[in-house]
Amino acid sequence: MDDVPFFDIQLPYELAINIFQYLDRKELGRCAQVSKTWKVIAEDEVLWYRLCQQEGHLPESSISDYSCWKLIFQECRAKEHMLRTNWKNRKGAVSELEHIPDAVLCDVHSHDGVVIAGYTSGDVRVWDTRTWDYTAPFLESEYEEDEPGMQPYVSFVRINSSLAVAAYEDGFLNIWDLRTGKYPVHRFEHDARIQALALSQEDATVATASAFDVVMLRPNEEGYWQITAEFEVQKLVDYLEIVPDTGRYPVAVATAGDLVYLLKAEDSARTLHYVYGQPVTCLDVSANQAAFGVKSLGWVYEGNKILVYSLEAERCLSKLGNALGDFTCVNLRNSPPSLMVSGNMDRRVRIHDLRTDKIALSLSAHQLGVSAVQMDDWKIVSGGEEGLVSVWDYRMSQKLWEVHSRHPVRHLSFNSHSLITANVPYERVVRNTDLDNFTTHRRHRGLIHAYEFAVDRLAFQSALPVCRASCDSVAGYNYDLALAFP
């Protein structure tokens, strides 16, 4: 045996590291038991740093941030296992974000734990659920203070890491910079009601659709907001999304009846899809693809489908599903690679395999139609028109748990440790005259719930803190968003 040369003696250390980088964590652990030399190689910081990056642990960190990346990897794995167990057992904490008295919830959106909501009173509110401080600041508008109760309803709200946007029923648009304060940095006016609103998740690009016009807004190099592109379409826009990671020139996808447009800032509006009499029922986009549901009508009924288009080649890649009901929601951007999840009016949630153009799984999830859906590498969270939020382990085809509220689920967003849900009423008028009665008002106003699964506490046993402060004290607070979002 003394005549058999080991490569760790004959080869340089750098080449040995280059060979070991192809091993996974279990194989590195086995190699560390061979000899002292192999143990030093198998526990090298470069190898374990790469493993952390490959599995998505601490993606923003550099190798010099920690001294023992093997220990960091083990801690991240243990935390990931704990979070998955808490998700399955509904173990954590849940809080109800405080409401605005005498107002009904109109629209909700969230990004990375920061929630924005618009109300019939014209108020716009922001919460940072990452800090568990649910006494949220208001975003001020520029309406005259001597006209109380005259502010129009909020139609749409959107938020990303730095901007908050709200569209109002009278065609006005307010844009706030969350890093500078609670007053708008830009105000834009349309001649008619805004039918659709989109905000880029990566940069400061806003798109609005009003009447037959689609406008893209973006700040220039000096920070002044301006119209980057303006398009004219043939019908009223139903859905509008901004394509992520497009670089200097923003790109959007808009649907108007049975037309689907590809809107590039440096080009005119181009028709991506059009079949007469087959309207589009939902839309989502990723960096290079667009997925939308199509309702089949006419003499030749082909069934309702989801079409997946390549945005670069501008052609159809897949025709998925063949359902009797309309597809009401589709999530392409947040789904794992080669998979996509959708919801339908036939009460079913479907996972589509984009490699085979087949349905990988179909779940009977709700009593009425599915209104919101999202998935990751092991679970599905879906919301229904009846107000039910369901969590599924789709690898086992098993429902883990569910919660119910009065109104339809209009917004749903989750990550590894938290879940945001919003139940928005159909009607925007509280019919009962006794608005001071909390029980009566709560039944009509809509709800926003924040779940945190990193807290070792049973969610269904934890109290629901409806208000962290009294209504009188909330009205007297003067918040600065620069402090709320450090």
Image (tube, rainbow, N blue to C red):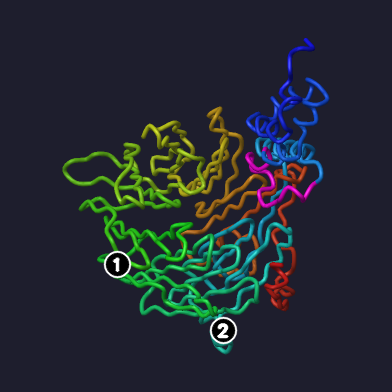
* Residue 53 can be seen, yes or no: yes
- Where residue 207 appears, as percent x and y from the top left, is 43, 68
Using the image as rendered, state which of residue 145 and residue 472 is in the foreground. 145
Q: Secondary structure at mark 1?
A: loop
* Residue 431 can be seen, yes or no: no
Q: What crowding class fits label 1: few (fewer than 14 Cα within 10 Å), some (14-19), or many (20 or more)? A: few
Identify the magenta region. Answer: 51-66
Using the image as rendered, state which of residue 155 and residue 377 is in the foreground. 377
Farthest residue, direction bottom: 146
Q: Amino acid at mark 2?
A: Pro
Nearer mark to the viewer, of 2 and 1: 1
- Asked where in the image residue 370 lies, by quadrant, the reply is top left
Q: Residue at x 70, y 57 (%)?
A: 130
Q: Secondary structure at mark 2?
A: loop
Q: Residue at x 73, y 58 (%)?
A: 132
- Asked where in the image residue 211 lies, by quadrant, the reply is bottom left
Does residue 320 sit above or below 406 in this rendering?
A: above
Q: Give the Cα distance between marks 2 and 1.
A: 43 Å
Using the image as rendered, state which of residue 104 and residue 109 is in the foreground. 109
- Where residue 241 appears, as percent x and y from the top left, is 42, 59
Q: Which mark is residue 436?
A: none
Which of the image's four quarters has the N terminus? top right
Tell me, yes or no, whether the highlighted magenta stretch contains residue 71. no
Q: Amino acid at mark 1?
A: Ser
- Asked where in the image residue 84 lies, by quadrant, the reply is top right
The residue wearing badge 2 is: 148
Q: Which mark is residue 268?
A: 1
Does residue 104 sit above or below 146 in this rendering?
A: above
Using the image as rendered, state which of residue 426 and residue 364 is in the foreground. 364
Q: Residue at x 19, y 46 (%)?
A: 298
